[in-house]
Image (tube, helix red, strand yellow):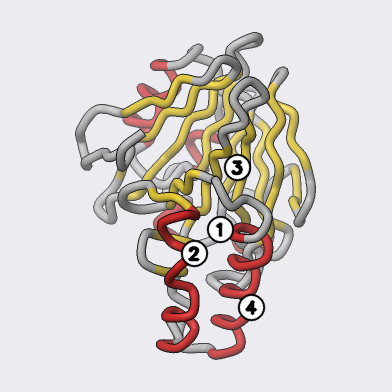
Amino acid sequence: MDAFHVTPGGPSVRITMPRLHLRKASVGPMDNNAYLLTDVATGRQCLVDAAADPDRLDRLVDEGSGRLDLIVTTHRHHDHVGALPRMSARPGVVTAAGDGDADALPVTPVLRLTQGDTIDLGESRLRVIGLRGHTPGGIALEYTCPDTGAVHILTGDSLFPGGVGNTHNSGEDFARLVDDVEQRLFEAYPDAHIHPGHGDSTTVAAERPHLAEWRARGW
């Protein structure tokens, strides 16, 4: 998988699994990662974070099956929702976001998601992981490949290579986020691949040894 690296304005990259394809592209001035999940059996597609540059996101959708069924927003920050109004106006699109962030989005989501919810994308199943602290309703999406057991988690801005997301100098929010990351990601998915909202991908195995360091520094 390497770092699953993309650059602004550059091509997307793809992880091809037997039942699900995962594409990643960089959009907008803040180099946001947008992800497209394509269910192989049905062609149903989910866009994760309609961050910016809807023309580029349209092309990303067309790289898959060409249809768009669902948009999931990982959290409410402006750089992750800039293209949401236009992308959600496509016919038949359902929108979803964490319950704690739903009312702050420019498009009110149809689905309000919480920890442990599941989303059926055709014959593929995604699991919702609540990661509170960067925002109150931040979520991640987990997919486990039934054929290989490989786990891929899209973490928004809650976990990056080198640490958790910014909690805006709130000790309580930092503690909540790092606890969720430890319990709901590191302990639950020790072999997972992590795909964040900005930058390169990483793994739980690479990040977990630094948890005590993150707690000590407080960010």
**Which residue is disc 4 drawn over?**
176
**Which residue is disc 2 drawn over?**
208
Q: Residue at x 44, y 50 (%)?
A: 203
**Which residue is disc 3 drawn over?**
72
Q: Amino acid at mark 2?
A: Arg
Whether the residues at callouts 4 and 3 have beta carbons within 8 Å, the answer is no
Res 162 quadrant in image: bottom left
Give the Cα separation between the discs numbered 2 and 4: 17 Å
Q: Secondary structure at mark 3?
A: strand
Mark nearer the N terminus (4 vs 3): 3
Q: Residues within 10 Å of mark 4 (few under 14, many from 20)?
A: some
Mark nearer the N terminus (2 vs 1): 1
Q: Secondary structure at mark 2?
A: helix
Mark nearer the N terminus (1 vs 4): 1
Residue 163 is left or right of residue 142, and the answer is left
Up the image or down, 102 lies above or below 62; here it is below
Q: Secondary structure at mark 1?
A: loop
Q: Amino acid at mark 3?
A: Val
**Which residue is disc 1 drawn over?**
75
Res 30 quadrant in image: bottom left
Mark nearer the N terminus (2 vs 3): 3
Of 67 and 142, nearer the camera is: 142
Q: Amino acid at mark 1?
A: His
Residue 140 percent location from the top left of the image: 60, 51
Q: Residues within 10 Å of mark 3 (few under 14, many from 20)?
A: many
**From the image, which quarter does the N terminus lie in?**
top left
Q: Residue at x 35, y 49 (%)?
A: 32
Give the Cα separation between the discs numbered 4 and 3: 22 Å
Camera-side mark, 2 or 4: 2
Residue 54 percent location from the top left of the image: 38, 35
Residue 81 is left or right of residue 123, and the answer is left
